[in-house]
């Protein structure tokens, strides 16, 4: 196991060269890279990442930050069967809690489709352009707020 | 066209579905549309995890897949070790490998049993379910439980293996390698099984990657992808094993990948027993475990594919956000792709051929 | 009488109740019969129970007083049609043999294939009373009738399957003189009776008003209709060689050589088509549980389900017996056992063989099933027919 981050640096530099002012580097660890992008630019960055070889979405995680009145969506992207296979690339974006609308990346990665649908359901983040924003896991008569928001409290746990 | 079709709900109360519904539209014997409807066993594991400490989460998080409980805990301990700064000692890493591979065998045998009965082969239901007991007994020797082991902890494993475990494990593995040859004769190379599974539900290589298939489903489509090789965690890079890959992408390929993994898992167990160093099995650090502020993403190869955890910590003993990305959930996008234009009789063969575990997908 | 904990105790209790009923009924009924009998023409009973000599009123009263006096008449009684149809070789024997012994043996035998125990608790030896326990369970179960069901046909269909299977029994001889009905065309009659089965299945599936039942019924219709043709073609060779459609004549023709040897291809086709007719694995598509719940049986419960199962096992017995009669020389065997025993032993072996297939094969798909039936089985059956014609033209007489 190499604990150096030269490859990851080189990869990030390649992305930075194209999207210098758009992306914000969050961390570079061995085999893990995280950048943050604004929702307006995420589609282009995602397309570029796919062209680099990151061809599958492993997870789409939404997180609620009531303290800063923001919500975060992180795509964890992996590369299947090419030389980047050991790297997990995290592509994050932040959006205001008041009107959480972000572009859907299903056109870039089809594998993001169900993950985005789940995030929509659990946090109420709307993915613009997603083909199927509807109930997935919750009961059909669910009338409460999306359950993974921080103001949704588990009864008896506070 | 509309009046020619018949809409069928396969599940949630159906012998061929589990806690899951597949809304199927039929035209004669041919499937024209499919809509998977998960969520019947959604328990909100991610939300519940935010209310539990890193240790309390261990038994809680293995509930979604109790037949592969080590597989679902493995990435959790890897990610939480990164956040809690608790590196595991080398012996613990080998014990983890043994336990994870035992669990992979247990899970695959369960899958094989159900697959047998799904294609109507009664003997292939009872043989694997019976022989699975051998491996459950082995796991019970280590962890003390039969299915929900709660054995991995951040910083190592709960206890060392008993002294008589290595001999017994090697004996069982040697016996079972012979036994698998009988399985091949009666099931995997049975002409009627070949007729039922070959050329059915073909998942092409590009589609498999594009739609997000992982694990045996991906390897059944000819993609050599396995987290154990791609990003060797624990001590998998010390162990010499192969990844079975089949090119056709049909149900039979996916079966054969899992059969090959049974052989490989036993091979890994035998090697890990031989190569295991001595020493402690748990990190000596004690006290209330608080995560350092930050985030961690860990992935491992569970029985069904890439199991991944994304944990965000804000310095408290609880995770701020825990995202569980399970392989079964990714099968949802494969279902429509594979089932449309197939026969009704192929629905169970394809559906369970993906090894979709509804409880895991619902979390 | 304590709390019932085992199945044996349950049976004992049932027998006790039966005993008291048997004791009480004569005590109440005998006076009534004594009052009615003088006004009742006893000769109307003769077709049912014809005794050798005329039984008059006084004789009948003696029977009622002392049942042991009936024993000398039993031998005559066993030769009556009533006994043949109801007891042996008719319905009671066949139902007990196929419904109790064969179901138990199938479960026990398959459990050995499956590497498990099978039934163990009911009965002293290997759970031998399990079928009776199941029968009692099904007797006391509620018969659930869904709202939208067409009630007439829903109830008629199980009776229809039982009637068809029972009718098959009448034509199959177990011994040179142990048969219910003999006809010059008995083989043809069997196929005529079998032809009713898909109609009943389709009625049941349509009356159930259930999508899964409907799919199962259609599958069953396709399967039964397409496999009747190879079934019929596969036995034509035997008809040519034996020169008769009479099953007893066919068995007599096998005195020196079983038809299994010259008609081997026909036997294979017959076995495969039989499996399809019986809807057993690998051809159990109409009841494929993981695909269509229970096929056309989905809505049936309780005793209606038990009747369908009994009919299925009677049909299993009847078709195995037909195979024995056609290919395995019927009652021919070494002298030390009675001919009926040889037939039953051979039937038992044939049924065990079919069970073994159930343990080792998966279920086949409907399109593959139809293709095998129409393309392969009919071709092989025709080749078999030509072999029979060739043997016949060589002048070999059976």
Image (tube, rainbow, N blue to C red):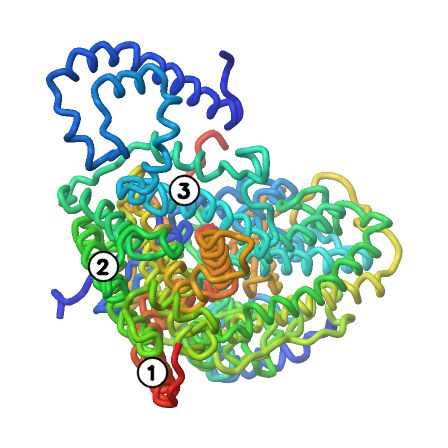
* Gap between marks 1 and 2 measured at Cα: 23 Å
Q: Nearer the viewer, residue C102 or A53?
A: C102
Res B332 visible: no
Label 1 with label 3: CB-CB less than 8 Å: no
Q: Nearer the viewer, residue C347 or C57?
A: C57
Residue matched to label 2: C193
Find residue A34 and report its horizontal and vertical position in percent.
Answer: 55, 68
* Gap between marks 1 and 3 measured at Cα: 37 Å
Residue furthest front as drawn: C53
Residue at horizontal 29 percent and vertical 32 percent from the top: C142
Disc 3 sits on a residue from what chain?
C
Question: Mark 3 vs mark 2: same chain?
Answer: yes
Q: SS of the residue at dot 2? A: helix
- Looking at the rendering, which quadrant does residue C74 occupy? top left
Disc 1 sits on a residue from what chain?
C
Mark found first going from the N terminus, 3 or 2: 3
Q: Is residue C264 left or right of residue C308?
A: right
Q: SS of the residue at dot 1? A: helix
Which label number is shown at residue C96? 3
Res A150 visible: yes
* Gap between marks 3 and 2 measured at Cα: 22 Å
Which label number is shown at residue C385? 1
Q: Nearer the viewer, residue C48 or B2?
A: C48
């Amino acid at each position: 196991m190499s604990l150096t981050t030269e490859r990851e640096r080189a990869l990030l530099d390649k992305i930075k060269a194209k999207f210098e002012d758009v992306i914000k580097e969050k961390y570079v660890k061995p085999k893990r890279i995280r950048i943050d992008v604004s929702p307006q630019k995420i589609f282009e960055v995602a397309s570029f990442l796919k062209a680099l070889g990151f061809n599958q979405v492993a997870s789409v995680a939404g997180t609620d930050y009531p303290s800063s009145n923001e919500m975060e969506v992180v795509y964890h992207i992996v590369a299947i069967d090419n030389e980047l296979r050991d790297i997990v690339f995290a592509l994050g974006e932040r959006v205001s809690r008041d009107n959480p609308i972000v572009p859907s990346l299903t056109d870039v990665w089809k594998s993001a489709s169900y993950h985005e649908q789940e995030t929509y359901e659990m946090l109420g983040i709307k993915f613009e352009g997603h083909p199927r924003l509807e109930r997935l896991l919750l009961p059909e008569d669910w009338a409460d707020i999306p359950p993974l928001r921080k103001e949704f409290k588990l009864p008896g746990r506070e | 066209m509309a009046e020619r079709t018949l809409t069928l709900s396969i599940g949630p109360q159906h012998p061929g579905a589990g806690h899951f519904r597949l809304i199927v539209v039929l035209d004669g014997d041919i499937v024209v549309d499919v809509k998977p409807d998960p969520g019947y066993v959604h328990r909100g594991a991610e939300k519940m995890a935010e209310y539990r400490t890193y240790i309390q989460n261990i038994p809680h998080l293995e509930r979604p897949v109790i037949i592969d409980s080590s597989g679902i805990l493995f990435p959790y301990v890897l990610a939480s070790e990164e956040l809690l700064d608790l590196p595991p000692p080398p012996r613990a890493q080998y014990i983890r490998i043994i336990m994870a591979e035992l669990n992979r065998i247990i899970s695959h045998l369960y899958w094989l049993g159900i697959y047998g009965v799904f294609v109507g082969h009664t003997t292939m239901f009872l043989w694997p379910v019976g022989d699975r007991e051998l491996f459950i007994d082995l796991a019970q020797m280590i962890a003390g439980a039969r299915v929900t082991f709660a054995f991995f902890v951040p910083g190592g494993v709960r206890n060392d293996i008993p002294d008589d475990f290595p001999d017994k494990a090697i004996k069982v593995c040697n016996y079972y390698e012979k036994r698998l040859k009988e399985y091949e004769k009666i099931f995997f190379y049975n002409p009627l099984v070949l007729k039922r599974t070959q050329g059915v539900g073909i998942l092409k290589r590009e589609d498999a990657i594009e739609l997000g298939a992982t694990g045996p489903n991906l390897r059944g489509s000819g993609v050599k992808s396995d987290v154990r090789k791609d990003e060797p965690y624990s001590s998998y890079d010390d162990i010499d094993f192969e990844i079975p890959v089949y090119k056709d992408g049909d149900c039979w390929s996916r079966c054969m990948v899992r059969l090959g993994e049974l052989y490989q898992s036993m091979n890994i167990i035998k090697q890990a027993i031989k190569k295991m160093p001595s020493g402690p099995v748990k990190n000596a650090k004690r006290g209330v475990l608080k995560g350092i502020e930050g985030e961690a993403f860990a992935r491992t190869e569970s029985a069904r594919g890439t199991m991944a955890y994304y944990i965000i910590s804000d310095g408290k003993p609880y995770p701020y956000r825990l995202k569980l990305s399970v392989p079964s959930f990714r099968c949802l996008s494969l279902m429509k792709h594979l089932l449309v234009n197939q026969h009704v009789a192929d629905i169970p063969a394809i559906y369970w051929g993906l090894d979709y575990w509804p409880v895991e997908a619902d979390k | 009488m304590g709390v019932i904990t085992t199945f044996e105790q349950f049976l004992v209790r049932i027998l006790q109740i039966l005993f008291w009923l048997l004791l009480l009924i004569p005590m109440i009924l005998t006076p009534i019969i004594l009052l009615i009998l003088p006004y009742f023409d006893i000769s109307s009973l003769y077709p049912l129970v014809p005794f050798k000599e005329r039984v008059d009123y006084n004789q009948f009263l003696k029977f009622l007083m002392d049942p042991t006096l009936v024993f000398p008449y039993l031998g005559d009684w066993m030769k009556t049609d009533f006994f043949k149809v109801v007891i042996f070789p008719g319905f009671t024997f066949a139902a007990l043999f196929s419904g109790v012994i064969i179901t138990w043996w199938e479960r026990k035998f398959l459990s050995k294939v499956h590497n498990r125990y099978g039934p163990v608790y009911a009965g002293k030896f290997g759970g031998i009373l399990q079928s009776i326990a199941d029968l009692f369970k099904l007797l006391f179960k509620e018969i659930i009738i869904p709202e939208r069901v067409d009630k007439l046909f829903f109830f008629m269909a199980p009776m229809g399957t039982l009637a068809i299977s029972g009718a098959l029994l009448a034509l199959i001889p177990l011994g040179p003189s142990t048969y219910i009905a003999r006809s010059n065309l008995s083989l043809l009659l069997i196929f005529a009776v079998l032809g009713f089965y898909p109609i009943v299945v389709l009625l049941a599936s349509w009356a159930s008003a259930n999508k899964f039942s409907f799919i199962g019924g259609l599958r069953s219709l396709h399967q039964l209709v397409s496999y009747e043709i190879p079934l019929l073609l596969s036995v034509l060779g035997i008809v040519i060689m034996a020169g008769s459609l009479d099953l007893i004549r066919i068995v007599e023709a096998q005195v020196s050589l079983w038809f299994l040897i010259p008609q081997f291809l026909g036997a294979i086709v017959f076995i495969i088509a039989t499996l399809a007719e019986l809807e057993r694995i690998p051809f159990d598509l109409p009841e494929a549980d993981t695909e269509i719940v229970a096929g056309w049986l989905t809505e049936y419960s309780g005793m209606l389900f038990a009747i369908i199962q009994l009919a299925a096992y009677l049909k299993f017995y009847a078709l195995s017996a037909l195979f024995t009669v056609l290919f395995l020389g019927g009652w021919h065997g070494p002298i030390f056992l009675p001919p009926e025993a040889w037939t039953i032993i051979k039937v038992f072996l044939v049924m065990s063989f079919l069970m073994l297939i159930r343990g080792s094969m998966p279920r086949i798909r409907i399109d593959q099933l139809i293709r095998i039936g129409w393309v392969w089985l009919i071709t092989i059956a025709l080749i078999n027919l030509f072999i029979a014609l060739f043997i016949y033209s060589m002048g070999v007489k059976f």
